[in-house]
Image: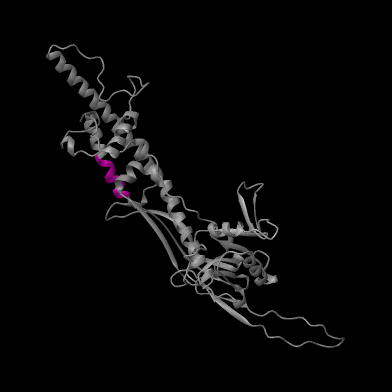
Amino acid sequence: MNRGQEIEARLAEIPGIIEKRGAEITDEELTALEKEVAALKEERKTLLAGAERRATLLNNIAEGQTPQATVRTFPDPAGASGSEETDIHDTPEYRKAFMAHVIRGTVMPVEYRANEITATTDVGVVIPTTVLNKIIEKMEATGMILPLVTHTAYKGGKRIPTSSVKPVATWVGEGQGSDKQKKTLGEITFIYHKLRCAVAVTFEVDVIAMSVFETTLINNVVEAMVKALEVAIINGSGMGQPKGILTESPLTKQVIDVQTPAYDDLIEAEAALPMANEGGAVWCMSKVTFMKYYGLKDDNGNPIGREVRGVTSGKPERTLLGRTVVCCDYIASLDASLTAGTPFGFMFNFKDYVINTNYNMGIKRYEDNETDDQVTKAIMLADGKVVDINSLVVLRKKA
């Protein structure tokens, strides 16, 4: 068996090794196999190029032609030496030809097309290497709400007592006692809600280009889980998911109906917030709504909002009447099209919301034996509820 046959045999053997090991194969083993496959393919390319040069040389000699010193399959990019291997799909010439093909439908030059089996008109176009190594995604703002709430790890189904009335102390005379007071207790029960996110890539992609996708896939999965939790914290129905803050029924005097943004809205909301709940309460609204309130001015022409540059964080610190504002995309913005009765902002102490996780978020990779796809998944069991409604003041669209 010559070296070329040994290379082909090993390349045919590696997929069987990966399939046999399945989910038990480690990242280190996969990395080693990836490097081995790349090295074998490079060696095979070198052997084929050598064989082609030998055949060309023999044919030229037989036909009486002068032997060529160098045989190159593709044109050199600018500045490349004749002895270096070049990725044809990463050259400026190929990228320009590819752009022209995509935009104007221009046929790719013959040196960039393969015609070994199918006709050249039937062969697809290879995406440039520099494009393959970049993943461009729509950015989403997440992670603003989750760090603010209270996190617990109670066993699912356990009842947690809460108190609705606090005892009152009274002044008494010498030798006198006071009335005994009944302590009224309620309870909160956390149950199991399963949150799962899975992304699959084919076996071929996993073997050839996993170094490009792995980090991005895991980041996407975690970001999706965080977003799902935060959406539930704000708007969750409580059916198959945590119950959201805006799904709770606020106290009657702590609902402010608003037609258009006004300075009095903030004054009324601050007045409705009980003194005992002032500490830690923050505003939560969309950035659009915040900017509308931030742009309001008092009778002296001074803006009622203040945006300062953080000394250590280097990012805007949003406040209204001195109270911190948390902007997120999970709540409707105040505009003319907003349906009457829809909340568009609220004041709340996020520590009064509890996320209970019986199984914390974990990342796992496994192989689907039916399709050989490599699946990256995250799963967790969680529930969430408001444990103290007194710090909630809601702004909603007036009818």
Q: Is residue 110 above or below residue 277?
A: above
Q: Is residue 376 above or below residue 130?
A: below
Is 208 placed left or right of 345 in the picture? left
The location of residue 261, given as percent across then percent down, is 58, 64
What residue is rendered at 61% in x and 50% in y? 316
Residue sitting at the far right = 174
The location of residue 304, given as percent across then percent down, is 66, 58
Q: Is residue 348 above or below residue 92?
A: below
The location of residue 239, given as percent across then percent down, is 44, 73
Q: Which residues are magenta?
A: 12-21
Q: Is residue 130 above or below residue 224?
A: above
In front here: 26 or 289? 289
Type of secondary structure dominating the magenta stretch: helix
- Total label count? 0
The location of residue 213, given as percent across then percent down, is 39, 45
The answer to whether residue 126 is visible is no
Image quarter (top left, top right, bottom left or bottom right) of the N terminus: top left
The answer to which image quadrant residue 283 occupies is: bottom right
What residue is rendered at 86% in x and 88% in y? 175
The answer to which image quadrant residue 325 occupies is: bottom right
Task: Please tell me whether residue 14 belongs to the stretch shown in magenta.
Answer: yes
User: What color scheme is it?
Assistant: one colour
Task: Please tell me whether residue 389 belongs to the stretch shown in magenta.
Answer: no
The answer to whether residue 230 is visible is yes
What residue is rendered at 62% in x and 46% in y? 314
In front here: 329 or 63? 329
Is 102 placed left or right of 286 in the picture? left
The answer to which image quadrant residue 322 occupies is: bottom right
